[in-house]
Amino acid sequence: MTRVKTLDDVMHADHVVKSEGGKITDQFAESMYAPSVYVDAYWDEHGDCQIMRHHELAMGEQVERDGWEVITGFSGQYLSHGTGIMHDSERIGTHHSPMGKLILENPGYYVAVVVEINTRPDDERYENENPEPAGWVLLFKEFPYDEDGNCQG
C-alpha cells in the first residue's frame, strides 16, 4: 500500500511549494527561490542567546522587503513572541493540522526556511563560525497579478 504524503513530506527547508485549489505542487517551472532569513539577538551573561520581540519584528520586516510574509501564530513554544519562529521540534504536519489547513485553504507560494542568528557574543571562540539556527519560519508569497487582475501564478 502506498503511503499518502503529508505536507511535512513535501515541504523541505528552502523548497518552495505552490498551493492552489487545495492541492500542493512542489515542482514547477517558475524560478522561485527561498530568501535567507536572519534574526539579530543578544547574548546574556551566561552565554545564552536571547531573541527578543523587536529582533523578530525586524526579521519580519526584512522578509517583507524580500517579497515574502512570515506566517505567525503557530508556535507552541513557551514565551513565543507570536512572530513566527518555530522550534526545530515543531512541524507543518498534515493537511488536517492548523498550519496545513492554512496552506491548503490560502492559494500562494509557501516555503519553510531555517532562521539563522545574525549576531555573536564578543568572544573569540565565535569569530569564524557560521550563524547558528534559531529555528524555522513558514513564509508566504501571493501569486502575482497582471494589471487586469488576472492571476499569473
Image (cartoon, rainbow, N blue to C red):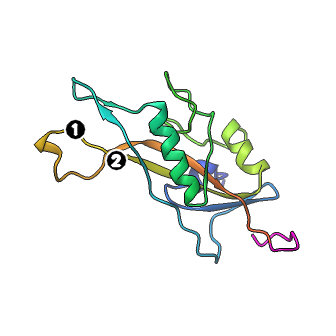
The residue at 44%/38% (across/down) is: 55
Q: Can residue 97 be seen in this view?
A: no
Image quadrant in which you'd find residue 45 = top left
Membership of 151 in magenta stretch: yes
- 146 up-or-down from 76: above or below: below
Q: Where is mark 2, residue-wise? A: 118
Amino acid type for the residue under numbered disc 1: Pro
Q: What element carries label 1?
A: loop
Characterize the local packing of mark 2: few (<14), some (14-19) or many (20 or more) Cα atoms within 10 angstroms. Answer: some
- The numbered disc on residue 109 is none
The residue at 22%/38% (across/down) is: 121
Q: Which of 70 and 64 is in front in this view?
A: 64
Q: Can residue 86 be seen in this view?
A: yes
The residue at 64%/78% (across/down) is: 29
Q: Where residue 13 appears, x then y in whole percent?
A: 49, 55
Q: Where is mark 1, residue-wise? A: 121
Residue at the outermost right position: 148
Disc 2 versus disc 1: distance between alpha carbons? 10 Å
Q: Nearer the viewer, residue 105 or 131?
A: 131
Q: Which of 134 and 118 is in front in this view?
A: 118
Q: Where residue 68 appears, x then y in whole percent?
A: 61, 56
Segment tinted magenta in the rendering: 146-153
